Amino acid sequence: MASAARSFTRALRTPAASSLKRSATFVPRTTFAQQARRGYADAAGAKKGGNGLLIGGLVAALAGGAGFYYMNGAEQVKAAGVFTPKQEDYQKVYDKIAQLLVEHDNYDDGSYGPVLVRLAWHASGTYDAETKTGGSNGATMRFPPEGDHGANAGLHAARDFLDPVKKEFPWITYSDLWTLAGVAAIQEMQGPKIPWRPGRIDRDVSYCTPDGRLPDASKEQKHLRAIFNRMGFNDQEIVALSGAHALGRCHTDRSGFSGPWTFSPTTLTNDYYKLLMEEKWAYKKWDGPKQFEDVSTKSLMMLPTDMALIKDKSFKSYVEKYAKDNDAFFKDFSNVVMKLFELGVPFETEERMTFKPSE
Ligand code: HEM
């Protein structure tokens, strides 16, 4: 209980984190179909721009006015992807996301950070190592079949949040942007640095993954292993990844579950493991799906899949380790999130970059 008390104090010291009350001002829901169409339109527009350059350039040269069309075309080529961005360009994208996180602090517990992490995870966690399908390459959640999967409910908020970033930096693919936003969100919520590399391409609707590839929170260890082993993760990695539930909350209008896992849902810490180990958890008495609440304050929650991590002996050994050692958690979390965000991507570069967090 001593260290749980410490996390209370920490939560109070962190202004955004301390407001567990839902001051949620939910962004208006754009229909997913619109979102998808927007994705298509961007891609098609960019391509058209590229061809337009060639044809436009020739016509203009013949007419003796090549200069103007050339200049105009150079920008179009940049938008079409011929522009080769460098680390400093990706850092600018990172900085923009960090700036928007600060500006839009009236969402949920004071940050879009958690829902951005969930977007990057759900984009990546569809990977099937055997068929090499799914994963963070493609950003196919833009399209209705995948965007409408029950597990993805509510993620339009994260995609809409990133729209102005995509408009300002049209050269970045949605799939690179979503994973970069996941990295930015983790780092800006005081998490470890996550090395990242670009190279994901956006794919069309035919690459949407079938429903059922993401975990079902009402299940237990057997299901967790089946889902995560399919992606290529072992027990230790499953437990390290689950520490992301220090962040954010469940929403009854999304998953049906309710409440946050920790007292500081906008700051990444190892509190998720500490609370799992130190608190008493009991079934919540309510009409909703089976979930657990902490006996002492009844304000926190655990999913059946979270509780499975302390029921299972092998999982529990890692929960104990991370509960005792935040540095060990941060080190393993950084490695496993890097791996998660790279699932299914045929990278051309071995080199990764790390981003400078905001001051
Ligand atoms: C182990 C299996 C997992 C299950 C069953 C699961 C299930 C869930 C559920 C039901 C929610 C609530 C969604 C809502 O109602 O808004 C949620 C939220 C969340 N999950 Fe997981 N999750 C799992 C693993 C992960 C992983 C691997 C990550 C990231 C590495 C992650 C990050 C998050 C975050 C940050 C939220 C909060 C989102 C918000 O506040 O809007 N989860 N998860």
Image: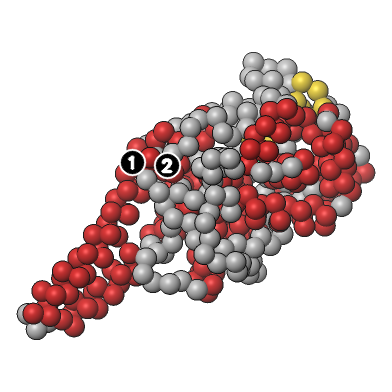
Identify the residue shown where x is 54% and y is 72%: 87
| CA gap, disc 2 and disc 1 | 19 Å
Identify the residue shown where x is 59% and y is 43%: 129
Identify the residue shown where x is 67% and y is 32%: 226
The residue indicated by pointer 2 is: 207
Q: Quadrant of the N terminus?
A: top right
Which comes sooner in the sequence, label 2 or label 1?
1
Left or right, 242 with respect to 156, comes to right
**Picture layout, residue 31 above or below residue 287:** below
Q: Nearer the viewer, residue 182 or 132?
A: 132
Q: Nearer the viewer, residue 185 or 129?
A: 129
Position of residue 240 measured from the top left corner of the image (x, y, whole percent): 75, 46
Q: Tell me the crowding category of disc 2: few under 14, some 14 to 19, or many 20 or more residues within 10 angstroms, Cα based.
A: some
Position of residue 330 measured from the top left corner of the image (x, y, whole percent): 77, 55
Amino acid at dot 1? Gln
Q: Tell me the crowding category of disc 1: few under 14, some 14 to 19, or many 20 or more residues within 10 angstroms, Cα based.
A: few
**Picture layout, residue 261 above or below residue 170:** above
Position of residue 92 measured from the top left corner of the image (x, y, whole percent): 51, 69
The residue indicated by pointer 1 is: 34
Kindly indicate the quadrant of the structure image that contains residue 84: bottom left
As drawn, the residue found furthest toward the left would be 63
Position of residue 268 measured from the top left corner of the image (x, y, whole percent): 72, 51
Q: Please say whether residue 317 is visible from this viewpoint.
A: yes
**Picture layout, residue 302 above or below residue 337:** above
Identify the residue shown where x is 18% and y is 79%: 68
Is the shortest distance between ligand 1 and the CB of mark 2 under 8 Å?
Answer: no
Q: Quadrant of the C terminus?
A: bottom right
